[in-house]
Amino acid sequence: MVQHSPTHFNASFAALADATRRGVLDQLARGDASITDLADKFEMTLTGMKKHVGVLELAGLVTTEKVGRVRTCRIGPCRLEEEMEWIARYRQVWDARFDALDGVIDELKRQEKARGRKKRK
Amino acid sequence: MVARKESESQRTTVQKKSDREVVVTRTFDAPARIVFEAWSKPELFKKWWVPRSMGMTLRSCEMDVRTGGTYRLVFGDDPANTFAFFGKYLEVVSSKRIVWTNEESGDVASTTTVTFEERDGKTLVVLSELYSTKEALDAAGTGAQDALNETFVQLDEVLAQLSAR
């Protein structure tokens, strides 16, 4: 679900699944940087860094602007932390509920099985 | 690979579809009629809707699960200090779907639609909560926590009164 969904949330999570991309965000939070700066900083090729920035840009976490031959990257408009916190809390509630529901369903299945055995006798 | 996919679909997913809508999915290892039973019988529903980790006590649970029926869940440890969640069932189709309103915040703050899709003996539950406004949705993630905090604040007040005597 995380990697292939077109929704903004999942794009954000996929973007953050990679340590380099988290590092890039951290770096950009401190100040704008060119793709070349970032490639140097993270010791990778320009092509590799362009890909990472592309993923972050798709998720709205980073925006880029090309002036002359330099592409400058900056933190994007997506207020991620707030949204992630919200969704984590929401998920927590449902996760706990559904785990408890598993228990109730197992019990119902056991009862049904027991009734089935009785009928056959 | 197949096994991995299966275990992934088993997990709870939460997706925000828009400013006003959140969709939660989860697959259960049982036919739809059993999952539906656990959602529609109050004595079963109350066993899982408020898991211990939520830190809330469900005092009573009245549910008339049929189209046009109503429900009322009352929470709180102290009988003098309770809060209720209530609303109406807009649509109930056995083993298929339940649609209800959530009216505790005044008017209809949100409408919940839950569908049960059975495949190979398992049931995919898709629950959508559509809020009337973006603000109502923003507040929702913290609902249970707020209710809990409220209880603590009230407890603090009682303790303060007692110690002042």
Image (cartoon, grey):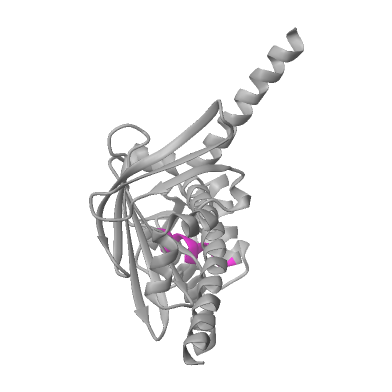
Magenta residues, start to end:
A9-18
Residue A27 image offset from top left, x and y in percent: 58, 52
Residue B100 pos. (x, y %): 30, 51
| Position above or below: B79 against A66 | above
Residue A15 included in the magenta stretch of the image:
yes
Residue A67, percent across and down?
36, 54
Q: Is residue A17 left or right of residue B110?
A: right
Residue extending farthest to the bottom is A121
**Looking at this view, is A52 or B143 the one in front?**
B143
Quadrant in the rendering for residue B38: bottom left
Image vertical order of residue B127 relative to residue B32, above or below: above
Regarding residue A4, the answer to whether it shows in the image is no
Chief SS of the magenta region: helix
- Residue shown at the point (50%, 74%) measured from the top left: B10
Q: Is residue A83 visible?
A: yes
Using the rendered view, name the quadrant where residue B123 is placed.
bottom left
Quadrant for residue B160, please give it: top right
- Residue A13 vs B136, above or below: the answer is below
Figure quadrant of the C terminus of chain B: top right
In this rendering, the answer to whether B147 lies above or below A117 is above
Magenta stretch: includes residue B79 = no
